[in-house]
Amino acid sequence: MQELDFKKLDGLIPAVVQDHVTGRVLMVGFMNDVAFQKTLETGLVTFYSRSRNKLWTKGESSGHTLVVKELSTDCDYDTVLVKVEARGPGVCHEGYQSCFFRRLEDGDWKESEKKTFDPKAVYGG
């Protein structure tokens, strides 16, 4: 079996997370080999945090988990598409359903939807 290519980005691959029902892109994170293996073992999406230099499973502090429904890779084996069931009102740490809640309109990035939860209540602050 062909292995994923973790060499191009210093041991990381992008992981595009998409809602398995609607097709909406919810977020993009990075995985190293250990995060990918943990995702396979647990069925919950686990990333490698570049800013914190550690693994983190989505939802470990918020409770808003991502349950894996399907995994695909691109033609170069250096990116994964993770189709998920998002459990919780949103995945964005700013309180939105998706991290992609801003649209470019007339040269400015504008919020294009309402928050689905209060991030202060979930993450403190």
Image (tube, grey):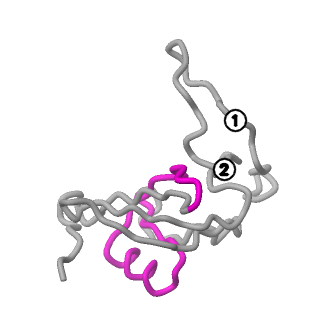
At 67% across and 46% down in the image, what residue appears?
94
Q: Which residue is mark 1?
A: 113
Whether residue 112 is in magenta: the answer is no
Residue 112 falls left or right of residue 6? right
Callout count:
2
Tag 2 secondary structure = loop
Q: Amino acid at mark 2?
A: Gln
Distance CA(mark 2)–CA(mark 1): 9 Å
Q: Does the residue at mark 2 contact the one at mark 1 (Cβ under 8 Å)?
A: yes
Residue 107 x %, y %: 50, 14
Residue 102 x %, y %: 58, 32
Determine which quarter of the picture holds residue 11: bottom left
Whether residue 34 is in magenta: the answer is yes
Determine which quarter of the picture holds residue 123: bottom right
Residue that lies at the very extreme toward the bottom in this rendered image: 41
Rate crowding at label 1 as few (under 14), some (14 to 19) or many (20 or more) other CA atoms within 10 Å.
few
Q: Which residues are magenta?
A: 21-50
At 45% across and 87% down in the image, what residue appears?
41
Rate crowding at label 2 as few (under 14), some (14 to 19) or many (20 or more) other CA atoms within 10 Å.
many
User: Residue 97: which numbered mark, if any?
Assistant: 2
Tag 1 secondary structure = loop
User: Residue 100: which numbered mark, if any?
Assistant: none
Residue 63 x %, y %: 70, 69
Determine which quarter of the picture holds residue 113: top right
Residue 20 x %, y %: 54, 62
Query: Which of the image's four quarters has the N terminus?
Result: bottom left
Along the viewing direction, whichever of 22 and 13 lies nearer the viewer: 22
Residue that lies at the very extreme toward the top in this rendered image: 106
Q: Amino acid at mark 1?
A: Glu
Along the viewing direction, whichever of 92 and 105 lies nearer the viewer: 105
Residue that lies at the very extreme toward the front in this rendered image: 21
Going from the N terminus, do you reach mark 2 or mark 1 first? 2
